[in-house]
Amino acid sequence: MGQRSESIEIGTIEFPINPNYIMKFASTRIVLLALALSNADFLVQARDISKPNIVLFLVDDLGYGDVGFYGATGVETPNIDALASSGLMFTDAHCTAATCTPSRYSLLTGEHAFRQEAKVLDGDATLIIEPGSWTLPSMLKNSGYATAIVGKWHLGLGDSTSGVDWNDEVKPGPLEVGFDYSFLLPSTGDRVPCVLVEGHRVVGLKPDDPIQVDYNERLGGLPDGFNNPELLRYAADSQHSGTIINGVSRIGYMDGGKNAHWVDEELPFLFNDKSEAFIEENKDQPFFLFYSFHDIHVPRIIHPQFMGSSSMGPRGDAIAQVDWCVGEVVKMLDARGLREETLVIFTSDNGPVLNDGYEDQAIEKLGSHNPTGGFRGGKYSLYEAGTKVSTILNWPGKVAAGKSDALLSQIDLGASLASLIGQDIKKGAAIDSIDYMDTWLGKSKTGRLELILEGYGLALRRGKWKYVMPVERDPYYDWVMEDKGIEHGRMRDAQLFNLETDEKEEENVASKYPKVVEVLERRLNSLVTGTRGYERP
């Protein structure tokens, strides 16, 4: 239901009305009679716009330059561009970490992942968010929101004591940390088990065909990439040469659950269907939808509808696939009259990567397209492109179109959205999250004074400076990253960049400014060991 320009109040119920009725009928009594006889839509109680619906689109591995309004070439993204052109586009917004699990953990908890030593998880890892703890969805749920996650999870499932039993109730999980509904790809598309979980159950699992998962030993029931390369759509590296599902070898081994195996090409349509069903069911109350894409993460298996829609092969086609999914959900919001009472956020969990284990011609077909938008690094990296991601906030009638160069972080969505809906955060929760709601809404240009960024190591943004802590190099790790063309940023010596004059981080000026290095090193250590050290604006 869209906004109406006037209303009258009777007791505690506010009835929206067309102002033409006021001009036609002079007495309140006649107005009320006209309302009673008019279309039933006029009798719906007005929504409390202080609690807008929230739709958060989180794309996987999408780089700063991977969509049209941020400079993409070789692929068109009209639906995402429409959000940017009529909303607020951020040019210095970051996820907190350059890899998926830590980034998602920070977004949902308001706490840096390194505080819990949260790393990229295997597909059989247990839940790393403590059930009952403060989370973004639990805060919204406690404020009267219906909450859902649809898509990729990768924060673990099951209890650390007993593990996860894929053949029974799969819990704890999202439903124990604030979500009312969940439809999950449990970890990543390149990891087993290749099944979907709705609520606490694997979708389509038959009791007489139980699932087995092992990340160390081959189970023997299903073919794998080492022994059956002729069955593969794409050649894969040794890490990704485990069990073959749907023509793609994955990390790890699984057996059984044949009826429950996903079909990669169908995932975008499944996720859209579940998202739209949740919106339809909850359209008359405030809702929070966390639409967590698997695209454009590897393996990039594209539905035939989108194959060839870019000049960049599967990676570009996956971007077009994401754009379509975004467009369909926004169209549904429009069709239900929900757009003006829905705050839409579009962003990514970390920076881009081209070849991340599969030979899908992402490098060969790149052309002139620059996924990083010209910034240094990418996924896994401590340089800017590891965490600087395309970020758009769109709320018709509430947020004016424009650009913001304020330094912002996804870790602040918890405190910011809590402020928007008038919720307090108890002491000790969301300790790294700061309320920047006015900046997210374009009412202020004030951004963060400082921000920790996490890759394989830590960096600190403060003012014009970026300090990258020294890290002992790992010959194997560094070779793997460099073989993939990834500039990881791990150096034995400290690095310092003046982003005001060198936004592409081309010159390490640590030797020129040893005092600055000393101050930033001390500050980073203080933030890492402290319980709430960030300066407030």
Image (cartoon, helix red, strand yellow):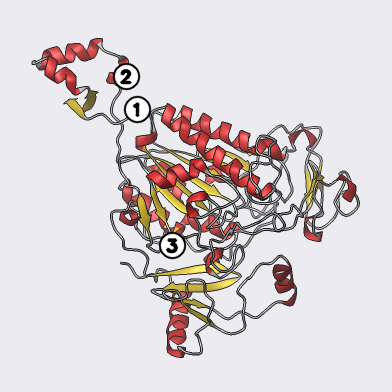
Q: Are marks 2 and 1 in contact (CB under 8 Å)?
A: yes
For residue 166, what is the image quadrant? Answer: top right
Q: Position of residue 205 (x, y in %)?
A: 73, 34
In the rendering, at what x and y percent does residue 481 appear? 70, 68
Q: Residue at x 59, y 37 (%)?
A: 271
Q: Nearer the viewer, residue 418 or 133?
A: 418
- Rendered location of residue 231, percent (x, y): 87, 45
510 relative position to 318: left or right: left
Q: Earlier in the sequence, mark 3 or mark 1?
A: 1
458 or 461: nearer the viewer: 461
Q: Which residue is mark 1?
A: 1
What is the secondary structure assignment of the residue under circle 2?
helix
Q: Is residue 30 left or right of residue 197?
A: left
Task: Name the residue beneath numbered marker 3.
Answer: 92
The residue at 77%/51% (across/down) is 250
The amino acid beneath tag 3 is Asp
